[in-house]
Amino acid sequence: MNTKEYKKIKPLEKPENIFDLKDRVAVIVGGAGKMGQQFARTLGFAGAKVVIADKNEEKCKKLAEVITTLTNSQLMGYKCDVTKEKQIQALFKGVYNKYGKIDILIYNVMAKPEGYYRPFKDYLARTWKEVLDSNLTGAFLCCREAANYMKKSKEGAVVLTSSTYGLVGPDQRIYKNCSPKKNIYGGTDPLNCPASYSVSKAGLSGLARYLATLWGEFNIRVNLLTPGGVYDGQEESFHKEYVDRTPSGRMAVWSDYNGAILFLVSDASRYMTGTNLIIDGGWTAW
């Protein structure tokens, strides 16, 4: 860039402008989950046109209606199974045909297939593949398709939702007293952190850094959001162990990540790419 080009960069001063997403088009893949819903509301309140994409089309459409009324923004629901490449292609083509652009992609998928919580010694290759197909390969495919349209406008923001367990190994001690009968996520095994989860979330870090360097010339930013554990009614033994291990003295609530996602997709972070924003109550500070 030369001096004239630098002078064309508009200064960011007023908070209402820095975080304004008016008329921007956002696709949230995995948008029907608890965190995805939070993201959809946050972006809707900021003025974005939001597409909630997930496997359950009916749920996506109902959420879109509810959040449209709540935020007075424009939302739509779209069916997308991230293990189906053609559905991913159809999603982004459909969004582009409707709005004429795609500004934001948030990939917020976490698969929990049958056998997900089995101990490592009994873990099935089939289950391992199902988790990686959704958590990691789906991210690759969505990024690839979204970028094809972002390049047309030479602008875009991509956020991949990772996990603290993509950064550090799980503290196995917090799961030692968990009971198979009290696993709120179902199955016949106690709550734990499967290796498939850690590996798939760690892979997102490499993908984000790679794409940040690949797409920088198109002004497409790619970053990670790494959340810590969220209180979701887990059994008390796990909750106590987790809280004792966390400097902030509590688990997160779902809305704790709203500010982070707004920062990452807005102009507030326009000079930020290839970076990991860790919001974990200090879990990884030890």
Image (cartoon, rainbow, N blue to C red):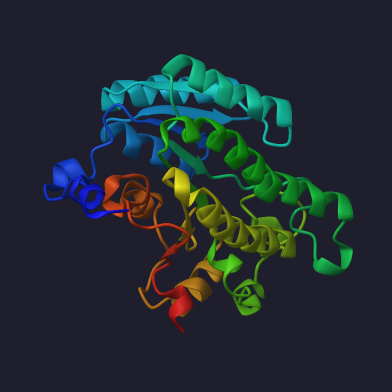
User: Please, is residue 243 above or below residue 91 in the view?
Assistant: below
Residue 277 coordinates in the image, percent (x, y): 42, 62
Residue 205 coordinates in the image, percent (x, y): 58, 61
Quadrant of the image occupied by residue 265: top left
Say which residue appears at 37% left-offset and 51% top-offset: 264
Residue 43 coordinates in the image, percent (x, y): 34, 37
User: Please, is residue 281 above or below residue 144 in the view?
Assistant: below
Say which residue appears at 39% left-offset and 68% top-offset: 250
Question: In the image, 221: left or right of 133?
Answer: left
Say which residue appears at 70% left-offset and 46% top-offset: 137
Residue 49 coordinates in the image, percent (x, y): 36, 26
Question: In the image, 254: left or right of 82?
Answer: left
Along the viewing direction, whichever of 106 and 158 lies nearer the viewer: 158
Question: In the image, 26: left or right of 53?
Answer: left
Q: In the displayed orientation, state which residue is furthest to the bottom.
A: 286
Q: In the displayed orientation, state which residue is furthest to the left.
A: 14
Is residue 278 among the parts visible in the rendering?
yes
Quadrant of the image occupied by residue 101: top left
Q: In the displayed orientation, state which residue is furthest to the top.
A: 98
Question: In the image, 236: left or right of 114?
Answer: left
Say which residue appears at 59% left-offset and 67% top-offset: 165
